[in-house]
Every structure is written in structure tokens, then in C-alpha cells.
Amino acid sequence: VQLQASGGGLVQAGGSLRLSCAASASIFGAMGWYRQSPGNQRELVATITRGGSTNYADFVEGRFTISRDNAKNTVYLQMNSLKPEDTAVYYCNAASAYGSLWGQGTLVTVSS
């Protein structure tokens, strides 16, 4: 099973981006987004269960929304009111029967 992330890019502070991550097969466990900026450890951004229960990191502060389309095996991250400190490589993750899966990462750059 593979995860393919997309949607990153360059945006000005205050702007929005929508990340997508498509799995090549059904995922019955939780899916989520993590991020890693230079010199820092990878950190949780948000997760969502197959049933739609969500969990967010404190720094999200209501700016991001995670959603999931089980029919398309896809998880999304809508990011609004972006800040320069949100600049990072964003990775999707899925808890599958094969273990924890990671996508290839998509770069989000927020300019001030």
C-alpha cells in the first residue's frame, strides 16, 4: 500500500492551501498529517479515524481542518490563516494492516 501526497506550495501569510493524500488501497485505521521543519523533529498536525473522529495539535488553533473520504481512500488537510512558522514538509500517515505507512512528503512554504 502506498500513500501519495500532493497540494503543497508557496503561499503568503494569511493564505490557504489544501493538502491531499491518496492511499492505493483501503485504510481501516486512522490517517493523519505530520510535519517537519529544518532542525526540528517530525510533529503531529492532525489525525482522523475512519469514523471521522479528529485530533489536532495545539498549534493548529482552529486554522486547519482534517477530513477523509473513505470511498476514495483519501485524507485532506485544509489549512487556512497560514503563518510563516507553518513552513515545513508535510507527511501523511496511515495506520494499515501492514503497519504505519508514510507518504513522500509535500513542501509547504509560507512567506511573510
Image (cartoon, rainbow, N blue to C red):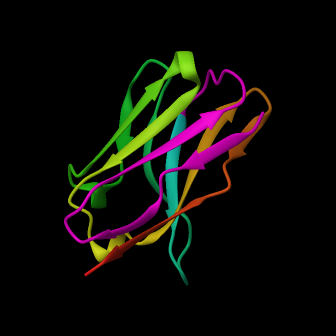
Q: Where is residue 19 shown, x and y percent of the image? A: 45, 48
In the displayed structure, 23 sits above or below 3; it is above
What residue do we see at 71% from left, 43% from top? Answer: 101
Which region of the structure is painted magenta? 1-30
What residue do we see at 59% from left, 48% from top? Answer: 5
What residue do we see at 55% from left, 50% from top? Answer: 6
In the displayed structure, 82 sits above or below 67; it is below
Magenta stretch: includes residue 54: no
Q: Where is residue 76 shown, x and y percent of the image? A: 44, 38
Nearest the viewer among 110 and 99 is 110
Q: How many labels sit on residues? A: 0
Q: Where is residue 39 shown, x and y percent of the image? A: 55, 84
Q: Is residue 73 left or right of residue 33?
A: right
Q: Quadrant of the C terminus?
A: bottom left
In the displayed structure, 27 sits above or below 77; it is above
User: Toward which corner of the image does residue 26 lie, by quadrant?
Assistant: top right
User: Toward which corner of the image does residue 22 lie, by quadrant?
Assistant: top right
Q: Is residue 61 left or right of residue 78?
A: left
Magenta stretch: includes residue 21: yes
In the displayed structure, 96 sits above or below 70; it is below
Nearest the viewer among 30 and 24 is 24
Q: Quadrant of the N terminus?
A: top right
Q: Where is residue 72 shown, x and y percent of the image? A: 56, 22
